[in-house]
Image (tube, helix red, strand yellow):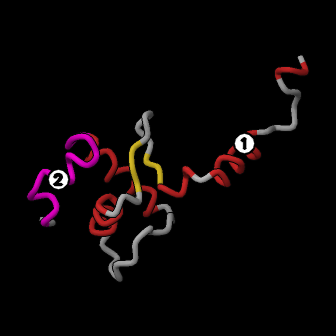
Amino acid sequence: MLDEFREDAIARKVGGRFKLTAMIQKRMVALNRGARPLVDLGTKDLMQIVVAEIMGDKIYLDTTGNVKTVADDSPLVDKLDRLLADDGGPNLSDL
């Protein structure tokens, strides 16, 4: 067992054990699908990577329960999200 789980600090950091479990599961799925780790630990142990990301404030759960990285909040990412969401159709103001 990882030492971080022996104390409640990591659970309090994310809002409780259920949110912690959800965050760990979702981030591990992302890492298994090819997402890059946000910390450099020199290990392939996904649990250690996810715990280090949480303790280092690199990831968090947003209000909808999705795991977000701190970099997701940058204005560049918001602009990219808007560009990708634009399907080339008319805006509501054009209707």
Q: Pinpoint residue 79: horizontal percent, then vertical percent.
A: 71, 48
- Residue 2 lies left or right of residue 33; in this view the side is left
Residue type, label 1: Arg
Camera-nearest residue between 89 and 58: 58
Instruction: Classify 10 Å Cα crowding around label 2: few (below 14), some (14-19), many (20 and above).
Output: few
Camera-nearest residue between 45 and 83: 83
Q: Quadrant of residue 18?
A: top left
- Residue 72 lies left or right of residue 84; in this view the side is left
Q: Pinpoint residue 4: horizontal percent, then vertical percent.
A: 16, 62
- What residue sits 89% from the left and 16% below the top? 95
Is the magenta region chiefly helix, strand or loop? helix
Circle 1: element type? helix
User: In the rendered image of this protein, does residue 37 appear above or below residue 73?
Assistant: below
- Which disc number belongs to residue 30? none
Magenta span contains residue 8: yes
- What residue sits 31% from the left and 44% below the top? 22
Camera-nearest residue between 57 and 50: 57
Instruction: Classify 10 Å Cα crowding around label 1: few (below 14), some (14-19), many (20 and above).
Output: few
- What residue sits 44% from the left and 42% below the top? 66
Query: Which is more foreground, mark 2 or mark 1?
Result: 2
Q: Which residue is mark 1?
A: 82
Q: Which residue is mark 2?
A: 9
Are dots 2 and 1 in contact, CB under 8 Å? no
Circle 2: element type? helix
Q: What's the magenta region?
A: 3-18
